[in-house]
Amino acid sequence: MFDDIPLWLYAVLAVVAVVTIFLAVRVLVRLYGLRRRVHAPDAPGTARFAYYAAWLYAISPVDFLPDPIYLDDIGVVLAAIATIERLTRRDRENSGPVTIRP
């Protein structure tokens, strides 16, 4: 059945799979790096919701696309990262200067 598929096509598919997995891991590491912003006392609830919803979608077995294709997972997590950064940046800009109390 797979005897007529050229070897270069297997190599291309392997490279695409490795790049996709690398991007998925990189995006999830970036999302994990936002945990301090989300868990800050002044973080908006929408940022928390986006953070946990992205994690839930990334690890859930239910996807828009089949599991070998991580494009939907990467897209949802990237949208959550953009939302979290926008909400926390706006919230920090509106809060004024930070004062450190002894």
Image: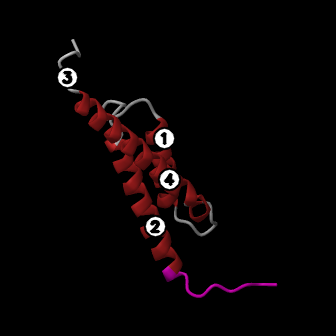
User: Hey, what amino acid is under mark 2?
Assistant: Glu
Quadrant showing the N terminus: top left
Kindly identify the residue that appears in the image at 55 percent across and 81 percent down: 95
Mark 2, other Cα within 10 Å: few <14 / some 14–19 / many ≥20? some
Q: Residue 56 carries which label?
A: 1
Disc with the residue nearer the chain's start (1 vs 4)? 4
The range drawn in magenta is 93-102
Q: In whole angstroms, how far apart are the C-alphas of marks 4 and 2?
A: 10 Å
Q: Is mark 3 on a helix, strand or loop?
A: loop
Disc with the residue nearer the chain's start (2 vs 3)? 3
Mark 3, other Cα within 10 Å: few <14 / some 14–19 / many ≥20? few
Kindly identify the residue that appears in the image at 57 percent across and 65 percent down: 37
Residue that carries the numbered disc 4 in the rendered image: 51
Residue that carries the numbered disc 2 in the rendered image: 85
User: Hey, what amino acid is under mark 1?
Assistant: Leu
Q: In whole angstroms, how far apart are the C-alphas of marks 2 and 1?
A: 19 Å
Q: Residue 28, how many percent across, how many down?
A: 49, 50
Disc with the residue nearer the chain's start (4 vs 2)? 4
Q: Which of marks 3 and 1 is in front?
A: 3
Left or right? Give the position of 29 relative to 71: right
Q: Residue 91, how many percent across, how many down?
A: 50, 74
Of residues 38 and 68, the one drawn nearer to the viewer in this rendering: 68
User: Hey, what amino acid is under mark 3?
Assistant: Ile
Q: In whole angstroms, how far apart are the C-alphas of marks 1 and 4?
A: 9 Å
- The quadrant holding residue 83 is bottom left
